[in-house]
Each structure stands twice: as structure tokens, then as C-alpha cells.
Amino acid sequence: MREIKPNKKNIFSKFFIKICRFFGFEIIDQSNFAAPVSNKSLNESLSIPGKRSITLPLGEVKITRKVKSFDVILRTCMTVNMLTQSKKRIFEKEKEEYTKRTLVSIIKSINHAKIKFKETKFKIYVIDHNSQNDQINMLKNILNNSQIDFEIKTLDFNRYSKEIKKINEENKEVTSNQKSNMSNIHQSIILSKEKCEDLTYFVEDDYLHKLSAVSEILFTYEKFSSLINNELIICPTDYPYLYTGANDTKVFMGENSHWRKIDQTLCSFVMSKKIINNYYEELISMCKFEHYPFEKPLHNIYKKELCISPIPSLSVHFTNINSIYGLSPNVDWKKLWEENES
């Protein structure tokens, strides 16, 4: 019988892979479309949260800014259909249906992110104003089954509404709905400042999220904050109104999405504790005086700090189909809606 000798080339390859793994190097075997050190296909993510970001063929970025926690502060009000519009939303459902699907989409996206971001802490806060008891119980039931830490709080409207100037920048009287909105933002910012350790995602209750939204946000934040050696702001929504002018921008490559520099958002965005502390007075000013546009204090912050949004969108503002502040372009809205029914 013929003796079968060990394949020296195979032995050397295994030894080399172990050495690369020990020193934290990655190698690419393009002959079989694999990354043998990570034991992954090149179709899979080669990035490691808190350690490195790899984008082929651009190479590796060492992560120096690890995300410790990701808190969601969801502002809800299921008794008001639209803040300033009388028009109906796409699909023409009751407001609580949009709130429910928003929460479901956030939970799904966080649980998807937890698979990779094992050392990141996640929590969901809900600050509600005037929703009915059965509506609040619906949210509680969803959250109880989510395996995510959560708290549901009631908006202290009387406390915060007293600080709002009655006449806005357009010399008009501030509406009761806008006072509710401003008060909820105010309480959200204070909650973040007092309770949240790192990143806070401030979000309204009519934004549905793709499954990959939270993981892409976290990968992107770690990569770009490490590259620029600074904090940044992330808006997960690609608003249609940002395309109404031919504005100059910068384009970045994230984990699975392209991102671009923007200088405007609505009131759903991700900020770090450091930025919140640095611009606390500017943020609170948005809650005490109705500017025109309402988000003007945010836009002033974006003149000093990098703010980016994804192309295509990771979350979609489900408002009226004709609103330039709503449905993001090049997204299957119906599919996203149906995926987050329950």
C-alpha cells in the first residue's frame, strides 16, 4: 500500500493562518473567495466591533472609538395623527399602528445588532404623552417580549410646557401639538444627559427601520469617529427634501452603506453623550422657542460637527406620500411596512 504523506503546503498554510490570527492580521484567499483567518466568506462582514473595520478592497481601520451603549428614546403620542398636517399618512391607518410598527422595527434591529455587538449595552426608553391605557399596554407587551431592557415614562407636560415661549419665530402662536412635541424633546434630552452613557438615538414614533439599521449605525459610528478622531451625528433617514437642491457634499463608505455629509435633519438622530454635553444649551433652546425652521439649532450644530445620513435610507419616515420630509427614495415602503406588522 502506498504511504500518504502530509501536504506540506497545507501544513504551512494552517501554521501561517494561526500566526496571522495571533497577531490580529487578516488575509484574503481570492481563489476560493474566503478570509481564512476569520473563517468567513468574503460575502460576510470581516469587521469586528470595537476592534477593526474592514472594507474590501480599501483595507482596515483600527477602531479607537468603541461604542459602549446604544439607548433609544422613542417619543410617542398615539392620540395625534399628524403634528401640523391634516393629510393622512401612507396606508391611511390609525396613529397607534405606526407607533407599534416603529417599536417592532427598532426591537428587531437591536436584536439583530446584538448578535455582533455583544459588548454593547442596549436599552429602550418610551416617553409618552396622552396615549390611552390600552395603547400603552400594547407597547408594554411588545417590549416585555423583546429581551431588551426598557422603561416607559409619561411626559411631564406641565413642567416643560411652562418654559415654551407662546409666540414663535414667525410671530405666530405656538400650537398645543407643537408644545407637546417640544416638551417631549426637552424631557428626552434631559433623560439622555442624566441616564445614557454613550450614544442616544432620539426618534419619533412614525419611523420604520430596516433590520440592519442599528448594526450599520454602530459599525459606521465606530469607523468614522475613529477615522476623524472626533464625535459625529448620525441621521438614519435619507430625507427626500435633501435632494431639492444641488448641494455640495462628501461621500463616505460604511459597513454596507454609503453615507453622505448633510447639514439638515428633522428630530430623529443619533448623538453621543459628549456632543449632548457640549451643545446642551443649543439643544434645549429648540425646546423653549419654536424656531423657523424648527430644527435650526440642530442645523447650527451641524455646521461645527459632522452629520451624515445613509444612501439608501436605513429608516423611513412614514408620513403623507407627498411630503418631502417623509418617505425616503429608493426604498420598498410596502415591504418595510409589512415586515414590521408584529
Image (tube, rainbow, N blue to C red):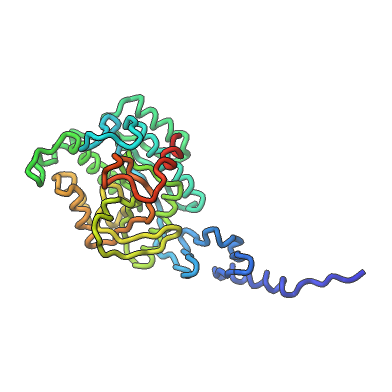
Q: In the image, residue 106 lies at what x, y percent?
A: 41, 43
Q: In which quarter of the image is residue 287?
A: top left
Height in image: 257 above or below 337?
below
Q: Nearer the viewer, residue 39 or 96?
A: 96
Residue occupying the point 40% across, 56% down: 67
Residue occupying the point 38% across, 32% down: 139
Q: In the image, residue 71 lies at what x, y percent?
A: 37, 47
Note whether residue 216 is visible.
yes
Q: Nearer the viewer, residue 329 or 118?
A: 329
Q: In which quarter of the image is residue 2?
A: bottom right
| Quarter of the rendering occupied by the N terminus | bottom right
Query: Is 25 displayed left or right of 286 in the figure?
Result: right
Height in image: 39 above or below 339?
below
| Quarter of the rendering occupied by the C terminus | top left
Residue occupying the point 31% across, 26% down: 132
Q: In the image, residue 99 lies at what x, y percent?
A: 35, 35
Q: How many labels does the image show?
A: 0
Residue at the farthest left position:
171
Query: Is 155 displayed left or right of 137 in the figure?
Result: left
Height in image: 291 above or below 158?
below
Residue occupying the point 35% across, 45% down: 316
Q: Which of 166 and 122 is in front in this view?
A: 166
Note whether residue 276 is visible.
no
Q: In the image, residue 255 lies at what x, y percent?
A: 45, 59
Query: Is 295 displayed left or right of 199 in the figure?
Result: left
